[in-house]
Amino acid sequence: MSEHLHPTDIISTVEFNHSGELLATGDKGGRVVIFQQEQENKTQSHSRGEYNVYSTFQSHEPEFDYLKSLEIEEKINKIRWLPQKNAAQFLLSTNDKTIKLWKISERDKRPEGYNLKEEDGRYRDPTTVTTLRVPVFRPMDLMVEASPRRIFANAHTYHINSISINSDYETYLSADDLRINLWHLEITDRSFNIVDIKPANMEELTEVITAAEFHPNSCNTFVYSSSKGTIRLCDMRASALCDRHSKLFEEPEDPSNRSFFSEIISSISDVKFSHSGRYMMTRDYLSVKIWDLNMENRPVETYQVHEYLRSKLCSLYENDCIFDKFECCWNGSDSIVMTGSYNNFFRMFDRNTKRDITLEASRENNKPRTVLKPRKVCASGKRKKDEISVDSLDFNKKILHTAWHPKENIIAVATTNNLYIFQDKMN
Amino acid sequence: MGEEEGLHQTQLLDTMFVRGLKRKCIDGEEDIEGTLAGIKAIPSYNLQRQSLLDMSLVKLQLCHMLVEPNLCRSVLIANTVRQIQEEMTQDGTWQMINTQSTGQTSLDRLVSTDILCRSSREQAEGKQVPGYSNFNKDFEDDQTQDSSETMSTASSVQAPRNLQSNVWEMENAQENRGNFQKSLDQIFETLENKSPNSVEDLFSEVDNSYYDLDTMLTGMMSNTKMGHCDGLETFSSPTTTTSNSNCKSDLNELDHIVEILVES
């Protein structure tokens, strides 16, 4: 795989658009950076275009909630692209409290030859105008502008963890720890609450919403996951408030594996529908599970991401790593799933061959344009050459965010400060 | 380590009292060893469970210091605390004092809690997961070292402490559980209505309780030092049952205790 490296602020979300031509990243500083794939060079058919910076803009600023005396972080939690309808691109970006719809448009022409204005913008004295001419558009250097078109604010008391655009392309949902709201993209002063799990007495709170997503094809169906390892599928046609689920997906706990950390590691950090809409994938602390929407009582596939950490759960609880929220993603054909781990490792699981691979995103170990070497972690016993022992893993180097191009074998992997883009070698 | 010495002696004597054993001089070391040998296997699990509880409560309190706590994390930690509390209640080893004193020096007393990562099945089978065997060995070595310096010869001094708490639990069970639940409740209320005042309220609540228990502990310690294992019966009249030599040592002990209290 060939590699491209882009240093940035701490990346908090990564997302390809629907065509894969654009890749958006959000960071802790509230900025959005969009990369664009170069158009394929017809003569050099052995490599796909590289991704270069296309646009950078400040999406969210830090705010202060005066009522609660709390700062609201500007960190971008999620970015979701809208499908392209015209020349401009649209995306939703959200921090803990506010969702914004951004329009990204190109400008490569500008009007020249005004009658009442000089070229630099100063106004001409009308009395000096003797003839009239029609202004014309002349080409200019490409300028990419981002402008906020809608701001959806004040609808969430708790921290927003997910946004998901409906397949009707008119509505979207936003989920915080206790509630899920439904919005219309055109309307900012109103949203509908569709899920509310806040107990009347906050002292009775034992479960929160961790992620939510609309079904890719059914515009009335969405799922949300919880900190107790359950996924609920809801149908908006059933009632206005979808507090009662249509389906509850939960794998019964293995009683022999029970420990004080069982609940924490069962907490689902991400849920993603397959492109087909037939399956959904969930990520908990140690594994990735694939669920068939027709079967609620257990997943159809389970992949262990880093089982060697099971014996280290206490230490990971102590240093808070056990609360890390890893994301997961499908490839375009739903045959491979990918997720991140520690030590800048990320893992891919082939659902058909049942093979898996561990790769590392790091500059020291990989030169650009070289093929990535598979890694192996040695859990115990004698460490073979080239293996890495569990104790020497760097838990500060975590890959939480990964994305897969919707059509090609191009992946984006975010380490703490860098974005790596890997592509398949085409032969 | 002087503090622990004192505690060991106290707990040892209270253990005997709690278990209804015939009260003897400290000279009867064989008996003490015999009775405690049976529970030698349990303490490391209890100690580490306690450590996990302490750690969790510290985390929850630290949550409050943050600008806006992560609700998911807080809920997961609180659920873990509840789990431990339930198990400890079932075991009868619920220790209020440790819960309340987390604000002080719990971080110093944290030990590696890898053993808790073992599944319950492994624990039942007594399986040694690689990496734990070293820890267990070290831990027991430390304990043996400590105890050889003190009068008590039990190799696992933490067990007495757990059993001692039984006394307090029987006396103060309702109040203790209520206090604990109140702390958890306050945490969630504070999470909802975050304001500087509520944070202070929460901390002041914890501090008050600690102070109360601290007084209790002081009383216990100063009384059990004197006489021959008369234990709690000498609570109200310390001076009447002591001999001269004990008086002197009592004064020294009191100074020692005051020193510890001032330090903490």
Image (cartoon, rainbow, N blue to C red):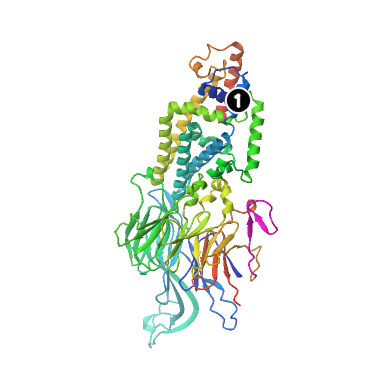
Q: Quadrant location of the C terminus of chain A? A: bottom right
Q: Which residues are magenta?
A: A370-390
What is the total number of numbered labels drawn onto the structure image? Answer: 1
Query: In the picture shown, does residue A77 fall above or below A427?
Result: above
Q: Amino acid at mark 1?
A: Gly
Which chain hosts label 1?
A: B
- Main SS of the magenta part reads loop
Picture coordinates of residue A154 (x, y %)?
A: 36, 56
- Corner quadrant of residue A237: bottom left
Residue at the disc numbered 1: B34
> Looking at this rendering, what residue extends furthest in the front direction?
B125
Q: Residues within 10 Å of mark 1 (few under 14, many from 20)?
A: few
Disc 1 element: helix
User: Which residue is situated farthest in the right direction here?
Assistant: A385
Q: Position of residue B113 (x, y in %)?
A: 57, 41
Query: Which of the 4 image quadrants contains residue A278?
Result: bottom left
The residue sitting at 52% across, 28% down in the picture is: B163
Specify whether A160 is left or right of B132.
left
Up the image or down, B121 lies above or below B177; here it is: below
Please provide percent x and percent y for residue A50: 57, 74
Q: From this viewpoint, is residue B247 visible?
A: yes
- What residue sits 50% from the left and 61% below the top? A328
Tell me, yes or no, whether the highlighted magenta stretch contains residue A383: yes
Q: Quadrant of the N terminus of chain A?
A: bottom right
In the image, residue A380 lies in the stretch drawn in magenta: yes
Location of residue A47 in the rendering, given as x and y in whole percent from the top left corner: 59, 77
Residue nearest the observer in this picture, B109 or B215: B109
Q: In percent of the image, x 43 and y 31: which residue is there?
A: B176
